């Protein structure tokens, strides 16, 4: 980047594109200094319908963030929200030659490469490699083992494999066409988890549900690390569509009703006033029972939560003590959604907002709708620090992806 003290993230959603720029201080804390948002023009129903139009929207969001921050950036971390990835936990183990000499960068590269063998055996290039921790002679929780002495070095790694979806490839092309480079790809549930989960929640156990527009990101965290992640192709926009279909009203009217009068549980809407639908939206002035709208919302949310439960079968959830559910994303703003989630999962539930090292923008940062965007900064910083630890003997897959994209396009 133009300034190594700066870091940037880009989150492309179904209706909105967000760019955040952060400044890294000497304590490796991030202060948000620039935010840019743009309508996701060129996107229709979660797919790219007009590449030049989307490229313009991406550029507008980045330029706005640069103007607010008063800096220029050259590259960004991009949130990856494709549904066809596969995540696997792996462990690499290497001996330190020389009877326990000082661990160097080449040793770090070797142990990560050993952990990545699992993905290589299936002939699928890892899209993302997340180092959870290093272990030296049985002592875990180490972030940087370089300079330590030991006989055995281990690495716990979460490897994301799969083929880049056409959407991800198109997003990368949009960023390049806008005149910027991609510093890295980060899985959205991982980014959101970095932004909203506390260290205690990650250690004791937490289920993260990030309700976006066209998708729902699911992350299981335990023992301080990612235990599993999945992105479901259903989100809060389906609630809007359900309302529009049920009451025969335009999408924009349904979205307004959901936002201004929506309840996640029908019981919470009992006795509420009917909702007026202006005649210019339906040709006939109409009123909709608030409780009937809540019934539609609850039905869709229950479907989403049931899909989440199915995805986490086989993990430590929903069994165990001290575990919790953390809801985030724009869909988490629906009134009563926490109570509904508690009924479905039988665990304590809270709304997750960006916390920890992300600071500087007050209420804006503290909105669940920005969790993934600001999580990209936090996750990106972790990736950048790891890159400084690794030796050139370990090959990051992103340059290969970039070369492949140049050949593809």
Image: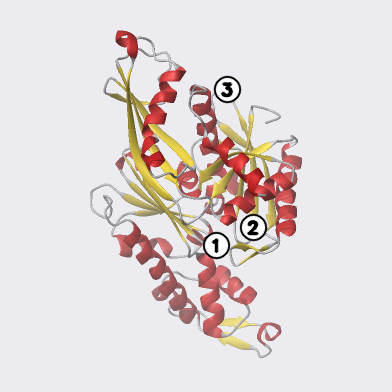
73 or 395: nearer the eye? Answer: 395
Q: Decide: is 285 above or below 311.
A: below
Contact flag, marks 3 and 2 (Cβ < 8 Å): no
Q: Residue at x 28, y 51 (%)?
A: 315
In this view, the residue farthest toward the bottom is 284
Classed neighbour count for the residue bearing mark 3: other residues with Cα under 10 Å, few (<14), some (14–19), many (≥20): few
Residue 160 occupies which quadrant of the picture? top left
Label 2 belongs to which residue? 16
Instruction: Kindly tell me whether residue 144 is visible in this rendering.
Output: no
121 and 299: which one is in front? 121
Spatial distance from mark 3 to mark 2, Cα to Cα?
A: 32 Å
Disc 1: CA contacts within 10 A as few (<14), some (14-19) or many (>=20): many
User: Where is the N terminus found, in terms of image quarters?
Assistant: top right
Compared across the picture, whether 302 is left or right of 47 comes to: left
Compared to residue 353, the image places residue 8 above or below, namely: above
Within 10 Å of disc 2 (Cα), the crowding (few <14, some 14-19, many 20+) is some
Image point (56%, 47%), residue name: 79
User: Does 195 appear above or below 256?
Assistant: above
Q: Is residue 186 left or right of residue 202?
A: right
- The vertical placement of 145 against 79, above or below, is above
Q: Position of residue 68 (x, y in %)?
A: 73, 41
* Residue under numbered circle 1: 213
Q: CA distance from mark 1 to mark 3?
A: 36 Å
Disc 1 secondary structure class: loop
The coloring applied to the image is: secondary structure
- Residue 272 x/y as whole percent: 48, 78
Between circles 3 and 2, the one closer to the viewer is 2
The residue identified by callout 3 is: 26
Image position, residue 100 (x, y; %): 31, 10
Front-most of 302 and 259? Answer: 302
Instruction: Report helix, strand or loop for mark 3.
Output: loop
The answer to whether residue 44 is visible is: yes
């Amino acid at each position: 980047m133009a300034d190594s003290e700066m870091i940037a993230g880009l989150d492309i959603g179904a209706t909105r594109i967000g760019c955040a720029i952060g400044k890294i201080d000497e304590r490796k804390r991030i202060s948000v200094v620039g935010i840019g948002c743009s309508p996701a023009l060129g996107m229709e129903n979660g797919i790219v319908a007009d590449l030049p139009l989307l490229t313009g929207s991406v550029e507008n969001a980045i330029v706005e963030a640069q103007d607010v921050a008063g800096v220029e950036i050259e590259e960004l971390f991009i949130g990856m929200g494709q549904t066809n990835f596969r995540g696997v936990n792996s462990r690499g183990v290497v001996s330190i030659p020389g009877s326990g000499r000082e661990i160097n960068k080449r040793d770090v590269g070797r142990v990560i490469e050993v952990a990545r063998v699992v993905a290589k055996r299936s002939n699928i290039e890892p899209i993302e490699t997340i180092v959870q921790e290093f272990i030296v002679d049985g002592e875990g929780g180490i972030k940087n083992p370089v300079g330590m002495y030991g006989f055995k070095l281990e690495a716990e790694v979460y490897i994301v494999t799969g083929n880049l979806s056409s959407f991800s490839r198109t997003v990368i092309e949009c960023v390049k066409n806008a005149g910027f480079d991609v510093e890295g790809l980060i899985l959205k549930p991982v980014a959101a988890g970095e932004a909203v989960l506390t260290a205690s929640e990650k250690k004791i156990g937490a289920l993260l549900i990030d309700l976006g527009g066209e998708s729902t990101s699911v992350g299981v965290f335990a023992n301080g690390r990612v235990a599993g992640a999945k992105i479901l192709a259903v989100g809060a926009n389906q609630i809007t569509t359900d309302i529009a279909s049920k009451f025969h009203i335009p999408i924009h009217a349904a979205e307004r009703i959901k936002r201004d009068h929506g309840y996640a549980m029908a019981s919470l809407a009992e006795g509420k006033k009917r909702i007026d639908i202006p005649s210019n939206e339906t040709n006939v002035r109409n009123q909709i029972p608030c409780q009937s709208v809540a019934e539609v919302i609850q039905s869709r949310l229950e479907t989403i939560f049931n899909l989440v439960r199915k995805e986490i079968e086989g993990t430590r959830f929903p069994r165990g003590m001290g575990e919790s559910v953390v809801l985030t994303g724009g869909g988490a703003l629906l009134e009563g959604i926490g109570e509904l989630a508690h009924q479905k999962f039988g665990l304590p539930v809270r709304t997750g907002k960006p916390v920890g090292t992300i600071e500087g923008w007050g209420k804006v940062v503290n909105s669940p709708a920005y969790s993934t965007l600001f999580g990209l900064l936090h996750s990106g910083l972790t990736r950048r620090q790891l890159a400084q630890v690794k030796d050139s003997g370990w090959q990051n897959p992103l340059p290969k992806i970039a070369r492949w994209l140049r050949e593809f396009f």
